[in-house]
Image: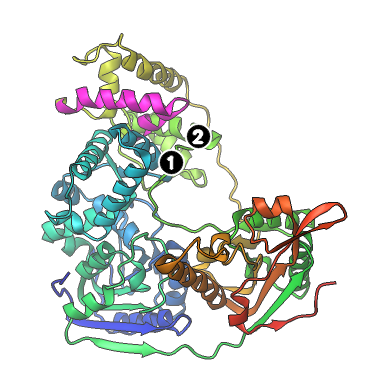
Amino acid sequence: MTLSPTATEALCITGDPRSGKTGALVERAVAWAEAAPASLNTQPPFLFFCASPVTIDDTALRLSQRGLANVRVEAVGLAEPAACQHGPRTGLVTTPFDYACRILADPRAQRATGRGGRVLSRAEEAVFYEDLKTCGLKRRRLRELWAFLQCGLANLNDGDPNCIQTTEERAILDLARDILAFEDAILPGEVVNLAVRALEAEPTLRQRFGSPIVLTDDYLLMSRASQRLVNLLATNKIAVAGNEYDILPAFEPYPCTAGFAEFEETYSPLQRVTLEAPFHALDRAWEAAPDLAGEMGLIARTIAEELAGGTSPGAIAVVCVNRTWRANLQRALASVGIPAASLGHAALKAPKGDLVPANDDERERVPRQLRDGIVQPTGLRESRARARADMSGIASHNEPSASPCGDSIAWRQWLSFDDALGRSAAVSELRRVAQPRGLNLAEALAALDANALPGLPATSPFAQSLLAPYREAQRLLGEEAPSVSPEPATHPTPAVAITAPEDLFGHTFEVVIFGGFVNGFIPSRDMCDPGVIVGGARARQETTDRAAIALTEQRTTRRLLFTSFESCDLETAERLRLHIPHIRLRNGVRTCNIEPSSYLQELNLRRTKHFT
């Protein structure tokens, strides 16, 4: 895809991991910002885009340390356009997704795309996917089609008339659009796509949201839509950085590996800078324990020694590819008083499975959202707004404006409680009757409650399925709102991170322990058994395994320890799907020999004193 150049000066910085690409990009941001004339217009003097929200704070800190004061950080969510104020030598560090949310909040963008509303949360998107299942397709086929459509949005293929080929694809796409329009909702996976379409259709949006200086880190970890977005926003200078060969897991699920080639094709002549990774001194070792419990103890002792030596718990991470192993380790560390917490990986992934039952927090949040989304007397509404602003974690940029009937998305979430399958069918029937009349979900429920919706009498089974929870919510909303007291601010206690290898992206640790480094975990059991995975699938899996090991090494600054265990009882080995080369009877228990990972030979590790 050839882009129209929007900047007069372009720079591409490439290099291996830990070669200093981000640092070089920060230096370029400082040089360009200092040379730029001061301006008090509504555009940010520079925009710095990160591929994942986990890298935003570190980047903003680097920029501030280099003299770019008051650098703002954009959190995930739909930002208020009126809050976008910039002074001299200030800029914004954000992700394409976050900035796209900011653009879509502008009425001009909503007119250009024909879409409005707010972005669905992870739980709300799962309810949307449940409604999508009413199409009647088998779940596996639906997952395949939905992944194809999501990939098309990320790659900007939705504007290609040849993209949608089959009747099934068209039916799913039309149904999704009908559901989203009925609920005034936007999917996370279409946010950047819609922002690109809005910028292309409405020139005044580029004047409002563009910037004379745009810099982008980890460019190849972004989708084509995100790459297109950052290019459209640059009005004078643009710089991108990334690694051309080693693609790592990141925030966006469909990264465009052709980004550099398309960038170079767009901007000619192009400045190119290639960095070489410096020698990185690292203490690399391997140690084996006699059994699984022994490995847990070995890791606990290693962490305790590091903590006693002054290492902060937050500077230590334990990595393993197996989720059950990680859960067992977290309990083992807690039993000896070592604080540990899972390190999640932020990602824009569409839901694929069944709807997860709502927890207590969700059941408390939705009524609040319903109450806040309904027009109320001014004094009461303002007092509640002040109370919410005082509560940590409650106020959100992603809240809709109040309306007489409330927030359609919150109503849909409320209806999903306790009977998701039946309510999806009922909402589908409600949509069929109400949408042609120009009603959204909240308005349709109000009309149904008043028995003023021709085509769906209030006595029908579908109507009764919806009216029972709707009237229960109205009863709760009619009661006096409970007083809201400010919650004290809490600061997370530093803890050892327990994580999968791919979740290390954007984080750096002094000490990393790669536990469970055995056959059956890495490589997987199916990879260890000959003939199960063959050909190209085997080559791809080996590449993924080696990338996980490489990422672990790249995210470590001082010490990297691989650990394994040599035996395990048969029941545990089967549950963990370990590779079992031999079984023997030991003290009446069938015990399996467990081999260290076959990748161990490639690592050339120093082996520490054998476990005793």
- How far from the left and from the top, in percent, is residue 420? 42, 29
Residue located 62% across and 80% down the image = 601
- Horizontally, is 195 left or right of 488 in the view? left
Q: Nearer the viewer, residue 70 or 260?
A: 260
- Horizontally, is 270 left or right of 97 in the view? left
Residue at the spot of label 2: 358
Give residue 468's mark.
none
Indicate whether 529 appears above or below 215: above
Circle 1 Cα neighbour tier, 10 Å, few/some/many (<14 / 14–19 / ≥20): some
Q: Nearer the viewer, residue 435 or 32?
A: 435
Under tag 2, what secondary structure? loop
- How far from the left and from the top, in percent, is residue 207? 16, 64
Count of numbered circles on the image: 2
The CA distance from mark 1 to mark 2 is 8 Å
What amino acid is found at the position of numbered circle 2 in the picture?
Answer: Ala
- How far from the left and from the top, in percent, is residue 40? 25, 68
Whether residue 542 is visible here, answered yes or no, is yes
Residue at the spot of label 1: 123
Give the residue at the far right of this rendering. Answer: 587
Circle 2 Cα neighbour tier, 10 Å, few/some/many (<14 / 14–19 / ≥20): some
Give the quarter of the image for residue 530: bottom right
Under tag 1, what secondary structure? helix
Q: Is residue 428 magenta?
A: yes
Sequence order check, earlier mark of 1 and 2: 1
Residue located 31% across and 26% down the image = 427
- Horizontally, is 459 left or right of 359 in the view? left
Segment colored magenta: 409-436
- How far from the left and from the top, in percent, is residue 69? 41, 73
Q: Are marks 1 and 2 in contact (CB under 8 Å)?
A: yes
> What colouring style does the render use?
rainbow
